[in-house]
Image (cartoon, rainbow, N blue to C red):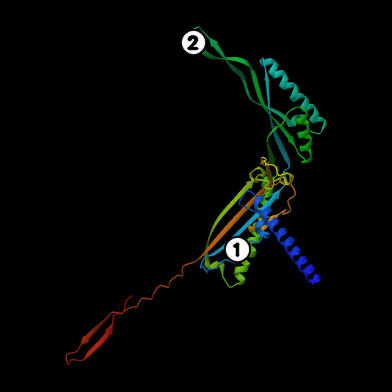
Amino acid sequence: MKKLIFTTLIILYTSFNFGQIKGNAISISRQNIATKDLGNGYVYGNNRNHFQTKNIIPNPTISIDVKALSNIVATSYTAVFNITQIGETSQETNNLIKQRTQKLREELVTKGILANDFVIDVISFVPVYETIVEKKLFSKKYVEVPKGFELQQNIHIKFTKVEQFEKIIAACANNEIYNLVKVDYFIDNLQEIYKKLRIEVLKELKAKQEFYNDLGFDLSEYKPIIANNKYCYFPRDFYKNYQAFNSISMEALKQNKGIYQVKKQTSYYYEPISFRDYDVVINPTIVEPVIQIGMEIKLQYSPKPKEEKPMEKEVIKNKYYIISPDGSIDIKEIKTT
């Protein structure tokens, strides 16, 4: 009897653990992703609708669609930082910001950044006002008077290796520059990339045309029309955000204390274009954010109308009749030249 109870408890404990693990996995996958697009979870998850085949309806029109995607690592980058400086006079403001940017430039040179790759873009230089109160015997006025000056600049820093970006961030922080505006990606051989994509698209297109020929369709008997498109996407267009879900303090529950909701930190992650719908993918393995260049060509073949053969006209030859006095009839044909 004891052995039976012990075995039952083991089964219940195992079932509870399995259900708990499964429940936690579903909870995390649903709650931690704030967007509707579940990314790879949609492909590998328990979404049964994804694996259902679509109904195929025969169509006299043949469509051949080829999509190609190329993941390109940038050849150079430009990081843009914003810096703001205030001072009592215009000269003091300008000198203070010049000292900070000059120290940053010198530190970056020691880290391998060329002096020509450091550019300052002046955004604004305006006076700063404050409001004072002028009191008179029977009235009170609020007057704005100059208090100082504010100078705002953008610093453009070009670099060619991803690992240099950490050094740039550290150098900016050492000089009290924290506002990173954006990072731009650049590639030098864009035309060569498009040329390579066109070659791969033509290879895939010929393979699909041969497939229809093997099925018994003579494409020469069809009238083709074409549509094409090309595009280029940068990493900044594909960053998504989410917030962590679990923020409950177990210690607060044990001590029977109130639970205070903590502000959730917004996290970001890079979600590139999925190559699930592409026929050709160049450099499919992505380790770092890349520039994604795509090309699509669509051919639509419609059956050519059958030519009707012209009907042969019946030629009626002219005839004349000769009636003799005795009543006999002689038929003669009129010869035409």
- In this rendered view, identify the residue nearer to me: 311 or 305: 305
In this picture, residue 311 sits left or right of residue 185: left
Q: Residue at x 76, y 68 (%)?
A: 8
Q: Quadrant of the N terminus?
A: bottom right
Q: Quadrant of residue 185?
A: top right
Find out whether the residues at labels 1 and 2 contact each other: C-beta distance under 8 Å. no
Across and down, in percent, residue 238 comes to 65, 46
Packing grade of label 2 (10 A; few <14, some 14-19, many >=20) is few
Q: Residue at x 58, y 51 (%)?
A: 229
- In this rendered view, identify the residue nearer to me: 258 or 92: 258
Q: Quadrant of residue 92?
A: top right
Instruction: Give the labeled residue for mark 2.
Output: 139
In this picture, residue 16 sits left or right of residue 37: right
Across and down, in percent, residue 100 comes to 75, 24
Label disc, if present, on residue 49 of the rendered structure: 1
Q: Quadrant of the C terminus?
A: bottom left
What element does badge 1 sit on? helix
Residue kind at label 2, given as amino acid type: Ser
In the picture as drawn, the residue positioned furthest to the right comes out as: 110
Residue 327 in view here? yes
Q: Residue at x 63, y 47 (%)?
A: 232
Q: Residue at x 83, y 30 (%)?
A: 110
Across and down, in percent, residue 17 comes to 74, 60
In the picture as drawn, the residue positioned furthest to the left comes out as: 325
Across and down, in percent, residue 52 comes to 60, 66
| Lower sequence index among marks 1 and 2 | 1
Residue 200 in view here? no
- In this rendered view, identify the residue nearer to me: 305 or 116: 116
Residue kind at label 1, given as amino acid type: Asn
In this picture, residue 57 sits left or right of residue 103: left
